Amino acid sequence: MKNWIGRLLGGNEKETAAAAGTDEAAEVQTDNMTAEVDAAFYRWLVRSSGTNASAEVEQQILDAVRALVDDPDKASVMVPRVPELITQLLGALSDENISISALSAEVGRDLVLVAEVIREANSAYYRPARPIEAIDGAVTMLGLNGLRMLLAKIAMRPLVRVKVQGVARQVAPVVWRHSERCAFAASVMAPGLSAGVFESYLAGLMQNVGLQVAFQVAEGLCGGKVPGSGTFGVELFAASRQLSAVIARHWDFPAEVVEAIAWAGDPDGPQLAQALAQGDRIAKLRLLLDASVIEDDDSFVTDGLNGFQRRCLGKLAELTD
């Protein structure tokens, strides 16, 4: 199996795990810093659709989103469901001993998937010595974990690219870019926290599903706009993350993934939740850097991330959409 994390950061697996887990005392990860990053990211995310909403409207939106947490049936129908074929494939991939030929046969059931897998294997990320044209070679290049992650990304893509109008549609491309980068960063953080790599990746992809539902709710109660306050954004992110967790549970996602999403904002949460929280913050900073909202020497980067996290932040710049 390809060690994609080592390849991403330029080191081997032992080096990656050691770097992520060392010098925890030097890591500055306070609640205030996390909230400040969330607020800055939210203000940038809704810069063209935010408005000065009253405190009453803000509270009404938050109450409506939190009410959906108690009504997963209603919440889950507001986003597309994961395709059945992808669910079956991910189930097959849970077998660590599955052969390349068996994997190729499973993927080969869908020509769109075949094209996606071959394209991924030929990407700059994997850098094959010569172009790969056959599905067997592509599956070999990706390896079991790489194939799992690609299939998860394909499955989750339509969940955040919702077919709605208004603010939810405007922010959808950015929300998806954040989801992809959060998934990669969380999975890179996972080994040093003794958390599952694929589970961290899946949690990163899933955690924004509730945010897209929240934006639909917000613009419906705010006259086609959304509150532009960063303070409101921090609360909306927290409420929507709980909504993502209940949707994930409703869809029978792995229990540890559901738990990680629900606890990602809590520093005392499980290891998988900590990997997700770190990946979330790194991904938000990457997008803010790419948009020139902050600079490389901003305190969010220099004080808010340790050396390994900053290295991951730099490598995220190489990911393509």
Image (cartoon, grey):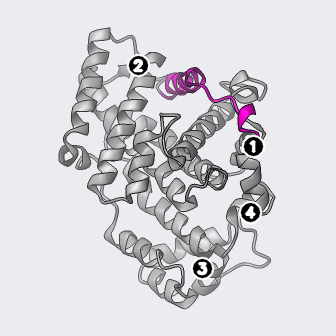
Q: Which residue is mark 4?
A: 13
User: What secondary structure characterizes most of the magenta part?
Assistant: helix
Q: Residue at x 40, y 48 (%)?
A: 259
- Type of amino acid at the residue the image marks with label 3: Val
Mark 2 or mark 3: name the one nearer the start of the chain. Answer: 3
Badge 3 element: helix
Alpha-carbon span between mark 3 and mark 1: 28 Å
Q: Nearer the viewer, residue 46 or 94?
A: 94
| Mark 1 in CB contact with mark 4 (< 8 angstroms) | no
Q: Which residue is mark 2?
A: 232
Picture coordinates of residue 289 (x, y %)? 68, 32
Amino acid type at circle 1 is: Gly
- Mark nearest the camera among 3 and 4 is 4
Q: Nearer the viewer, mark 1 or mark 4?
A: 4
What residue sits 55% from the left and 42% below the top?
A: 274
Q: Is residue 181 visible?
A: yes
Q: Which mark is residue 197?
A: none
- The answer to whether residue 150 is above or below residue 136 is above
Circle 1 — which element?
Answer: helix
Query: The magenta stretch spans which residues?
Result: 22-45
> Which residue in the protein does label 3 denote?
139
Residue 49 in sight here: no
- Queried whether the magenta region covers residue 34, the answer comes back as yes
